[in-house]
Amino acid sequence: MASLYVHVPFCVVKCGYCDFNSYVVDDEGVHDRFLRAIERELAVSWPRGVRPVSVFFGGGTPSLLSPERFAQLLGIVDARVGLGDCPEVTFEANPESLTREKAEIARDHGVRRASIGVQSFHARHLEFLDRAHDAAGAEAAFAALRAAGFDNLSLDLMFGVPGETLVEWQQDLDRALQLGPDHLSCYNLTFEPGTKLTHAMQRGEVEPNDEEVDRAMFLHTRERLQAAGFEAYEVSNFAGAGGTCRHNDHYWLQGDYVGVGPGAASHMAGVRWTNLKPVDAWADAVLAGLPAAGSAETLRPRQRVAEALWLGVRRAAGVDLAALEARLELPVREWFAPVIAPQVEQGLAEYDGVTLRLSAAGLLLADYVSGALLAAG
């Protein structure tokens, strides 16, 4: 069973921290060509009538499309998979482009979950992050989705913005909770290679936030959200009344998935491929009836195990190595015991011979632990 990801690469602005495959494109003719190509790619990538584990419309900014084009996109996918019958269907939205009309269009097409890119409620941090909305806009977008009937809403927040204080982050969390979200994703800002933010850091124009302040923000997040009734089911993700994000959890469990759209990735039984990233190049290939993949690889057995551990160890439930051995028919514990042992000795991981999970100390160094597992592949 596989999940389906639909990549909409258009944004109103390219945020300085973002390394996703997204573009500022004002020409709506490009949007129309994108929709024609999505329909063509989906026709050859997904069997009609087969229900995905989940469907995720991501980006970029799916809500950036005009109401008519947004309805067309949802209709194309609905005709292929029957969105109303899928266990979970999510679309990403940014406050500056989300309207009550678009929210109602999504509901009418079977979408039941929305994820809003808020990042912060502080004007100075929104400006630093190149966000195109303000705090009032974020709250209005949330209200529009609720008014349209959405009962499973997630907010994306970001901490560790250069110069941000613990008090400011506490205020962001409190303001988010006042809205009553059903899920929260709280990410530590990272300086990704090739981004405008990283180039600014390399020129000495920006300094990362103090590590001890970021650590305090991380710990406060877990304490505050636990007190509010949220479950930390992954390092950066917290389930409330809406439960976990099934789509992301499917990725973390190394499930199969099909991605359509420019730069979208797919994975099937250890084979992974990624579409051409430029919108025109991707659309040219698809509309000419040619493969859209720009790269592909078959994962080596040890690499496949390493990626499963890298993804799975970030989950609160950890990784069941016995189940992984049974699924892949590989000697997982024999191969990775020498890598796991030092993590346990350093107090960063807990391992009972079957399940590997991060310790309380390991949560603070999740990237280090998961990176060590990945590198062993």
Image (cartoon, rainbow, N blue to C red):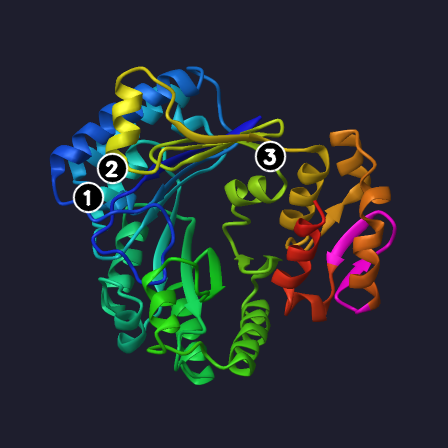
The stretch drawn in magenta includes residue 159: no
Residue under the image location 48 percent in, 63 percent down: 187
Q: Please rate how many residues cluster around mark 3, counting C-alpha atoms within 10 Å: few if below 14, some from 14 to 19, many from 20.
A: some
Residue 39 is left or right of residue 27, and the answer is right
Q: Find the magenta span and give its range.
A: 346-357
Label 1: which residue? Answer: 101
**In terms of image quadrants, where is residue 275?**
top left
Give the x, y percent position of residue 188.
48, 67
Q: Is 161 rendered above or below residue 163?
A: above
Q: Does residue 255 appear anywhere in the picture? A: yes
Question: Are the two marked residues, 1 and 2, in contact with CB atoms closer than 8 angstroms?
Answer: yes
**In terms of image quadrants, where is residue 335?**
top right
Residue 32 is left or right of residue 171, and the answer is left
Residue 316 is left or right of residue 173, and the answer is right
Label 2: which residue? Answer: 105
Q: Is 123 rendered above or below residue 142?
A: below
Identify the secondary structure beneath mark 2: helix
Question: 272 or 249, which lies in front?
Answer: 272
Q: Does residue 72 appear anywhere in the picture? A: no
Give the x, y percent position of residue 33.
19, 28
Question: Are the two marked residues, 3 and 2, in contact with CB atoms closer than 8 angstroms?
Answer: no
* Residue 351, disc: none
Q: Earlier in the sequence, mark 3 or mark 1?
A: 1
Whole-Å distance between the Cαs marked 3 and 2?
30 Å
Q: Please rate how many residues cluster around mark 2, counting C-alpha atoms within 10 Å: few if below 14, some from 14 to 19, many from 20.
A: many
Residue 332 is left or right of residue 304, and the answer is right
Q: Earlier in the sequence, mark 3 or mark 2?
A: 2
* Residue 255, disc: 3
Q: Label 1 sits on what residue type?
A: Glu
Question: 33 or 334, which lies in front?
Answer: 334
Identify the secondary structure beneath mark 3: loop
Q: Quadrant of the N terminus?
A: top right
